Image: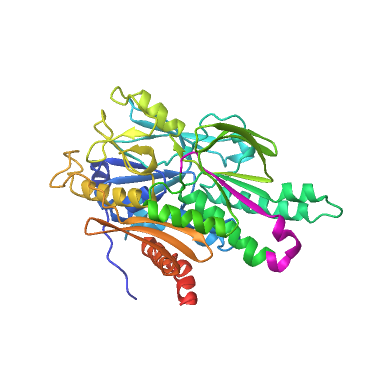
């Protein structure tokens, strides 16, 4: 019987290796872990989720197009050839004691609902905890809005959509009540907001129209953006194309519109017109989805307060060209919790994770914590992609330093193929590949 060779370490050897703790299981962390030489360190991974989530397809989960479970991959799949060399704790890191080099973790699944707590010492720490949803302290957002960052968020939105449809279908409902139940307001004109609005309109046009056709005309998706355009990172040509296609699908696009307050059942907004005049308006909703950006998690803000060089943490932990946290000799940060003046995207986080693994693989684990023979991190922008509904997509691709704008059905096929390339394991690939094959 074949038995693979395994390296057996003595207790002394294990003790000689430095303890490297990785917080989080998002794009940055799993890209780091999948390339890291885990035999060079005592690696501990801590995260409330024991899986990696393929976030680009979260909007598709809200309409039932994709089963949420198919977007989750066990985090242990990324621990390399010797997964037993990595310890994983399904827990939340609640505080980092910077001076003591200790992480306080909490497991909410303790007996009788009591949270179990523990302290994890570290020699080196990689922060990949992501970020929270930015609400800009607007009253009512936390109480009434749904978000779209996690599997539970997507399931909550999915359930709300179904609830609103069933409520509108109830006997003897007035036209006014039906229309209010079927008003979906999406705040945020970035990729997440645009793709969710597009996926939802597809659901209305393709599924709801077949199953409950009498409700289709009353269903209204409204996309609100404070800036002058949606998808502001794209070229003007693609922005105009996107807004035109969204409006063709009866999605109401409201730009230069700032949310001032969220109430139960309506949103108060301020619209800035072309002439500079401002208009206050109230927009009713049956479902409100908030997709406006990020803010640092509390554990990141608390850590920054302990490091004198971290003066401004509004965009995350400031890092140097090697992704080391400024002012700290033994902490690194990547992804949405790092302020590296790069967009908070999966593309950035994945490249940072791969690069940081190279840094660690080139360090002498027991003698030095300085990178050797590694160039500073350089982000290689591959382009920006977004689905805009009706099997159409837009893309600003980068080729030989030039931006190449593209939009339409074939761009949609490319969008699917690009997601296939982003899949970090073979399990997720068929999920993305099948629609491409089917459409061809």
Q: Residue furthest top?
A: 308
Q: Nearer the viewer, residue 347 or 384?
A: 384
- Give the side of residue 237 with respect to residue 195, left or right: left
Q: How many marks?
A: 0
Locate the N terminus and report the quarter of the image it occupies: bottom left
Residue 213 in the magenta stretch? The answer is: yes
Residue 206 in the magenta stretch? The answer is: no
Q: Nearer the viewer, residue 248 or 188?
A: 248
Say above or below: 395 vs 284.
below
Q: Nearer the viewer, residue 181 or 251?
A: 251
Q: Position of residue 374 (x, y in %)?
A: 16, 47
Q: Nearer the viewer, residue 299 or 233?
A: 233
Q: Position of residue 200 (x, y in %)?
A: 59, 57
Q: Which residues are magenta?
A: 209-228
- Give the side of residue 199 with respect to residue 168, left or right: left
Say above or below: 346 vs 204.
above
* Residue drawn at x 63%, y 54% as measured from the top left: 158
Say above or below: 360 vs 387.
above
Q: Residue furthest right?
A: 172
């Amino acid at each position: 019987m074949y038995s693979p060779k395994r390296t057996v370490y003595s207790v002394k050897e294990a003790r000689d290796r430095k303890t490297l703790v990785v917080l989080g299981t998002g794009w940055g962390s799993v890209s780091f872990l999948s390339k890291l030489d885990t035999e060079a360190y005592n690696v501990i991974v801590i995260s409330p989720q024991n899986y990696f989530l393929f976030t680009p397809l979260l909007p598709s989960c809200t309409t039932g197009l994709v089963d949420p479970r198919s977007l989750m991959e066990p985090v242990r799949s990324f621990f390399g050839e010797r997964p037993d060399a990595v310890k994983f704790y399904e827990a939340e890191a609640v505080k980092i004691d910077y001076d003591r080099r200790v992480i306080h973790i909490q497991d909410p699944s303790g007996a009788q609902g009591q949270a179990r707590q523990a302290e994890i010492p570290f020699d080196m720490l990689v922060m990949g905890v992501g970020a929270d949803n930015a609400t800009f302290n607007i009253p009512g957002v936390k109480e009434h809005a749904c978000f779209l960052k996690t599997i539970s968020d997507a399931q909550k939105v999915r359930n709300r959509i179904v609830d609103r449809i069933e409520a509108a279908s109830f006997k003897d409902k007035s036209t006014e009540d039906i229309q209010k139940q079927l008003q979906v307001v999406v705040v945020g004109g970035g990729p997440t907001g645009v793709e969710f609005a597009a996926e939802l309109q597809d659901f209305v046009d393709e599924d709801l129209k077949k199953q409950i056709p009498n409700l289709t005309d009353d269903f209204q998706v409204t996309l609100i953006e404070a800036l002058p355009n949606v998808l502001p990172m794209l070229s003007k040509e693609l922005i105009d194309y996107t807004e035109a296609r969204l409006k063709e699908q009866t999605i109401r696009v409201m730009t230069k519109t700032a949310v001032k307050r969220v109430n139960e059942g309506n949103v108060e907004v301020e619209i800035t017109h072309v002439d500079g005049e401002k208009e206050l308006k109230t927009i009713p909703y049956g479902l409100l989805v908030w997709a406006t950006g990020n803010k640092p998690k509390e554990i990141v803000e608390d850590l920054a307060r302990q490091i004198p060089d971290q003066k401004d943490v509004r965009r995350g932990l400031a890092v140097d060209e090697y992704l080391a946290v400024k002012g700290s000799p033994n902490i690194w940060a990547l992804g949405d919790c790092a302020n590296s003046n790069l967009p908070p995207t999966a593309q950035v986080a994945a490249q940072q994770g791969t690069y940081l693994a190279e840094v660690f693989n080139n360090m002498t684990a027991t003698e030095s914590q300085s990178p050797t023979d590694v160039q500073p991190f350089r982000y290689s922008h591959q382009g920006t992609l977004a689905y805009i509904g009706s099997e159409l997509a837009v893309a600003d691709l980068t080729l030989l330093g030039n931006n190449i704008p593209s939009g339409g059905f074939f761009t949609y096929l490319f969008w699917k193929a690009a997601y296939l390339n982003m899949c970090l394991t073979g399990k997720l690939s068929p999920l993305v590949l099948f629609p491409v094959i089917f459409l061809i």
